[in-house]
Amino acid sequence: MSLGFFRGLRTRRHKVSYDSYRVCTRCVMDTSDPFIEFDEVGQCNHCTDFLSNRLKMTIHNNHEKDATALKKVFEKIVASRPYGVLYDAIVGVSGGVDSSYTLMLAQEAGLRVLAVHMDNGWDTPISVRNIRRLINLPNVGYYSVVLNWNRFKLVQRAFIEAGVPDIELPTDIAIQSALHNVARIYGIKTILSGGNIANEGILPATWLYNGRDSFYARSVIKSSGCPTAHYSDINMSLFDEMKFRFVHGIETLYPLNYLKYDKAIAKSQLADRLGWQDYGGKHCESTFTRFTQLIYLPTRHKVDYRRGYFSADICLGRVTREKALSELQCPPWSSVNVKKDISFVAWKLGYEEDELWRITHLPHRWYTDFPNHEKFLAFLYGTYRFFTRRNKASNF
Amino acid sequence: MLRRRLIPSLLVDSSGHLVKTQCFNNRVYLGDPLNAAYIFSEYLADELLVLDIDASKENRSIPIEFVTALGKFTNIPLAVGGGISKLSHVEAILAAGVERVVLGSTLSSDSSFLSDVSRSFGASSVSVIVSYVSRDYNSGKHPPLGPFLTAVGPNALEDIILSCEDDGCGEVIIYDIERDGTSIGFDVELVSRLSSRLSVPLVVAGGCGGDDHIIDLFNNSSISGIAVGSNFVFSPNSKQVLLGYPEETSYLRSRINEPRFF
């Protein structure tokens, strides 16, 4: 346990400047993460941490628990059902496969689920239809949180103009904030998240920094001249998180870590049972996410999210490193209509098309270039993990 | 026979918010109108009705940049309205790829505008929207009548739409104020009477609460389309924001598209 404490405290991220391109010898993570570290045999810190620490949080190294672990989690939720509360758990639904599958599992286990959708103005037709299919299930309620688009647009613009890769951070934190607030209103104590280590276990902090660090988000927004009040609407700081956790007793669980989660199987089950539709591509249930992961980050930061997903798959033995490398040869945007996406995103955010294209090619920055509370948060998280005997399973 | 149209109706307010009203009051914020239009367009809605409900009050027309974007990012027929009071507005809006302009309150002060537009751009590119209360409020204590051409009582409504037809409008949209956003169903009797008197296509808005209402109205009147608000923008049981549109294979579609033999 004490090791975990120190691991949490170890936050010194020295900017290693790699003179040349380098890729891990075990997974496919490369120097597109400026803080990547390689050991003497050329294996990177991401896959090492994934294999030695993070997988322990999942069922993947624990075969005999497989069948019953998730059932026990759900049974516990049902057993501790408080009197007079309409729902047992909240699931945030985006229409994507992770959240849809989580909701379906919970519903089939007999939980009364409140599906909460946070609409940030970038919903796609398929995702909305998928949500409709989900909420038609018995014992599933629905609640929507719609962000004020005119203000949220400015926050997204601010992150783009600051040049950091975290342009999805406002959305992530708005989802957390929405889920926790709805949980508090309804008196629900459990949030079931579709987040999972099997697929998302390898994503460097530089690619998407911690949303709880409001100090960082505010300094990014200020640097672009956007009023920080717009961010306060959607923010959930670490203080808020602690309030929800300890005062309101709201806990977040990750059911997909309790089974051998395989996206392809999940998709086919959803399609069979609900008529759920695949949208192609990871996280492409939102136009902005698609733009971010497939066009913006690969162009501006040379960051390819597929590298993270492939690396996790390699560590789990689902794909060979050679196959991943060959698939990475083809550019991430090859599966989308780049011109159409750019013009839609540009119009929605209030840019000219060529203006957004120009911004996409400007020099980039990382979260370390802005004032942040990374070390302070790491200390708090480390302390919390130490006292609750938890292991570190995330970047922060 | 012509396909009976199900038309999502999107109301936009002065700050560019998509809203849903109830009895032309109590606005509920629904999000970004452009994304909603894009979603309905991908669902292949028969037509999209987009109205700027604050434009005429503020003496402006619906922002032309917004209409341009609508034309650019949708590929279904569009009907656009809100404060259109000049021929130049009409020209710009039609040039943006919009099928039909929707005229409303302008006609109450400038009755020749409709025939001007109809003559210049053709009857098929102009609709008139009339909001009405279906009872006669003799004391004048009727609810707020909204930003459109307005009528109090069924007879006044009939007079207005028949005179609009004479002036050369290609379509009439009638919007029941007291049913707006309530999902209680349509006034089938009134609608069927009006549709039998009118020779141009009639579109009915206000009050749709579900598939049954739509099927009932289509089967008992000869209207051309129904404009639906709440039912297409809220989730089925709770009034929470979730866009939706009946799929081509849905029960509703199969019922309203069947030809009537008698």
Image: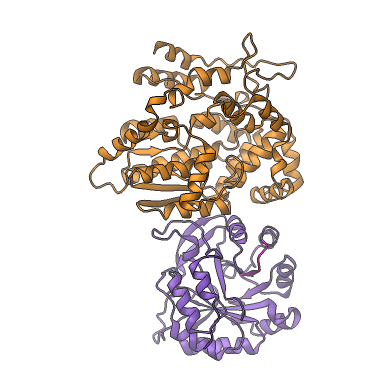
Q: Is residue A225 visible?
A: no
Q: What residue is drawn where x is 52% and y is 71%?
A: B254
Q: Is residue A11 visible?
A: yes
Give the magenta range.
B75-82
Asked if residue A272 lies in the magenta stretch, the reply is no
Q: Quadrant of residue A35?
A: top right
Q: What residue is drawn where x is 43% and y is 18%?
A: A382
Q: Quadrant of residue A331?
A: top right
The percent coordinates of residue A267 (x first, y second) are 52, 44
A202 over A349 or under it: above or below: above
A42 over A303 or under it: above or below: above
Q: Which chain is purple?
A: B
B10 over A51 or under it: above or below: below
Q: How many numbered marks have been drawn onto this rendered protein structure? A: 0
Picture colour for chain A: orange
Q: Nearer the viewer, residue B188 or A171?
A: B188
Q: Nearer the viewer, residue A203 or A62?
A: A62
Q: Nearer the viewer, residue A329 or A242?
A: A329
Q: Is residue A333 left or right of residue A57?
A: right
Q: How is the image coloured?
A: by chain
The percent coordinates of residue A263 (x first, y second) are 53, 38
Residue farthest along the top direction in this orientation: A40
A312 over A138 or under it: above or below: above
Q: Quadrant of the N terminus of chain A?
A: top left
The percent coordinates of residue A227 (x first, y second) are 56, 40
Q: Nearer the viewer, residue A216 or A111?
A: A111
The percent coordinates of residue B9 (x first, y second) are 55, 67
Q: Is residue A215 left or right of residue B73?
A: left
Q: Is residue A110 left or right of residue A347?
A: left
